[in-house]
Image (cartoon, rainbow, N blue to C red):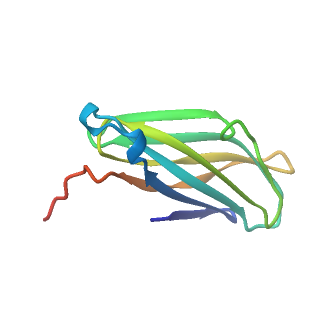
Amino acid sequence: MQYSATTRHIRVSVRPVYLEDQSAPTDSHFVWAYQVKIENLGKETVQLRSRHWRITDARGELHEVRGPGVIGEQPVLEPGDVYEYTSGTPLATPSGIMMGEYQMENERGEMFDIEIPAFSLDSPYQPVRLN
């Protein structure tokens, strides 16, 4: 499943993938990769300066991650550019949710946040509940 959000003509799309081969459910260790695509649909050049993630596991425990750039880069996106990267996250529960913001800077030095859409982290070990 893919999740998308657009802020100020910048679309962020995320596709999470459960990593069975890196997970150990009997040890409460569940791992996901997430593929991110950032598309500059606007008319101004922007640079991704920092990230802020909020990761919540199935017990409601929140873990926040802040830092410069993504995967060691601070990409510049000119109008029409697309930047893609893959990262990952472990959880101690078989499901969770992630969301956040990227801080961007335009050519005039204006800083602004763009939304990273909330996306679900689901493993095959998450029990299904019927209402």
Horizontal side of 46 relative to 97 (left or right) equals right
Q: In this rendered view, identify the residue nearer to me: 92 or 80.
A: 92
Q: Residue furthest right?
A: 108
Q: In this rendered view, identify the residue nearer to me: 64 or 25.
A: 25
Q: In this rendered view, identify the residue nearer to me: 33 or 121.
A: 33
Quarter of the image that includes the N terminus:
bottom left
Q: Which residue sits at x=54%, y=64%?
A: 4
Q: Position of residue 22 (x, y in %)?
A: 42, 40
Horizontal side of 94 relative to 47 (left or right) equals left
Q: Position of residue 128 (x, y in %)?
A: 19, 58
Q: Which residue sits at x=56%, y=63%?
A: 5
Q: Residue furthest left?
A: 131
Q: Position of residue 83 (x, y in %)?
A: 72, 56
Horizontal side of 118 relative to 26 (left or right) equals right
Tally of numbered discs = 0
Q: Which residue sits at x=27%, y=31%?
A: 27
Quarter of the image that includes the C terminus:
bottom left
Q: Which residue sits at x=86%, y=49%?
A: 108
Looking at the rendering, which quadrant does residue 7 occupy? bottom right
Above or below residue 27? Residue 88 is below
Q: Position of residue 43 (x, y in %)?
A: 82, 67
Above or below residue 55? Residue 119 is below
Horizontal side of 104 relative to 29 (left or right) equals right
Q: In this rendered view, identify the residue nearer to me: 99 or 129.
A: 129
Q: Residue furthest front?
A: 21
